[in-house]
Amino acid sequence: MINEQQTTDLYEAIAQMRKLSSKGKSFSITHSTFNQDEQSGHGLKHCQNAILRPAAKGDDVRNADLKLFYYDQDNRLNRTAWQPLIMYFNSQKCILT
């Protein structure tokens, strides 16, 4: 269940995601979806057991510095989230300050 009273800074949450991932520990993440090419969203995506994967180089992926690359361990899929659209990390609401 998502507890809206606990909040964390978005970039602190990303730092915590990196730390957990470096130790091989998963985390939960919820983010809004957005397809830049189609200029459309498809609701929310929730992943209960995510782990970060290496970021793409800016030359390889457009706007790579604004994206978070993770692996969905439950569905065994590589996923990408726009960093500003990350809403929850381990049930804590992320705020962009």
Image (cartoon, helix red, strand yellow):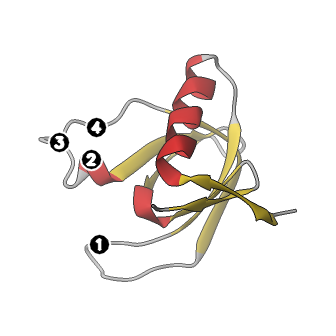
> Where 36 sits versus 80, above or below?
below
Q: Nearer the viewer, mark 3 or mark 2?
A: 2
Is the Cβ of the residue at disc 3 closer than 8 Å to that at disc 2?
A: yes
Q: Earlier in the sequence, mark 1 or mark 2?
A: 1
Which residue is denoted by mark 1 in the rendering? 36
Which residue is denoted by mark 2 in the rendering? 65
Q: Earlier in the sequence, mark 3 or mark 1?
A: 1
Looking at the image, how many numbered discs can be counted on the residues? 4
Mark pair 3, 2: CA separation:
7 Å
Q: Position of residue 84 (x, y in %)?
A: 42, 62
**SS for dot 3:** loop
Q: Nearer the viewer, mark 2 or mark 4?
A: 2
> Where 61 sits versus 36, above or below?
above
Query: Residue at image x 51%, y 35%?
Result: 15
Q: Position of residue 34 (x, y in %)?
A: 41, 72
- Which numbered circle lies on residue 56? 4
Q: Is residue 16 left or right of residue 3?
A: left
Kind of residue at disc 3: Gly
Q: Residues within 10 Å of mark 2 (few under 14, many from 20)?
A: few
Is the Cβ of the residue at disc 4 closer than 8 Å to that at disc 3?
A: yes
Q: Residues within 10 Å of mark 4 (few under 14, many from 20)?
A: some
Is the Cβ of the residue at disc 4 closer than 8 Å to that at disc 1?
A: no
Q: Is residue 81 left or right of residue 92?
A: left
Which residue is denoted by mark 3 in the rendering? 58
> Where 18 sits versus 87, above or below?
above
Q: Residues within 10 Å of mark 3 (few under 14, many from 20)?
A: few
Q: Earlier in the sequence, mark 2 or mark 4?
A: 4
Q: Position of residue 78 (x, y in %)?
A: 50, 43
